[in-house]
Amino acid sequence: MVKIRPYRKRGKSGWEVDIIVRLPTGEPIRERVKAPVTSKSGALAWGREREAVLLREGMRPRKTAAPTLAEFWPDFVKGYIEANRQKPSTIVTSKSIYETHLEPAFGSLRLDAITDEKVQTFKGGLSDRSPKTLNNVLTVLSKALRIAVEWERIDRLPCRIRLVKVQKPSIEFYEPADYERLLDGAQRADERTHTFSRYSGATRGYGSARSSP
């Protein structure tokens, strides 16, 4: 027996196929599934074909599809971020990163479909952000995928997430002769400038530091 009814779940529409069969052994089987077609007549035809398969082969174990990032995210927030009692600021930041960056880019993708190529394309789209900001976003995504593996939502990591290098500004110190000329000029300017220059040099190890261009 095959019944068709409207499918309404998680904002999706379509047709649900409800199939009930009894095998020659007397074992009853019931399967309810969203039809892979959009029309009612197409869903009914698909359901009848599926009914024939069930009568012939019985119910075979089917591998559960990986959840999308949007489906997994609430579990990750509750079961990992909040359960581990991370700082309120960290929780707020993680949620903001997801809503601003991860959900638009990966929310509709199944976790095992977040590939290296998609991550690299995503990184390219954030080229206007600082390396530190980008790394914060990538760290949240990486942790979510690793927890998904631990919780057996996916079999393995679908990609390798590499952080970008954060360059630290180099510091160049004045040579002794240059530093003496600096103090002489500061002394000619006024006593306050001279005093500040000497104090700054002492606290920096020898001379006043200047950032390289």
Image: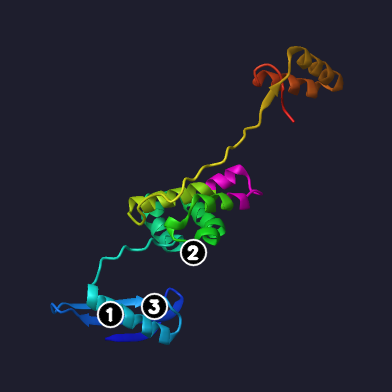
Q: In percent of the image, x 45 and y 80: which residue is there? A: 38
Q: Nearer the viewer, mark 1 or mark 3?
A: 1
Is there any visible trace of residue 140 in the rendered image?
yes
Identify the main secondary structure in magenta.
Answer: helix
Q: Amino acid at mark 1?
A: Ala
Left or right: 61 as drawn, with respect to 85: left
Q: In percent of the image, x 53 and y 49: which residue is there? A: 137
In-front residue for pair 71/22: 22
Q: How far separated are the C-alphas under marks 1 and 2?
A: 33 Å
Which residue is label 2 attached to? 108
Left or right: 32 as drawn, with respect to 94: left
Q: Nearer the viewer, mark 2 or mark 3?
A: 3
Q: Amino acid at mark 2?
A: Ser
Which residue is label 1 attached to? 52
Q: Which residues are magenta?
A: 123-136
Is there any visible trace of residue 85 in the rendered image?
no
Q: How far separated are the C-alphas under marks 2 and 3?
A: 19 Å
In-front residue for pair 172/52: 52
How many numbered marks appear? 3
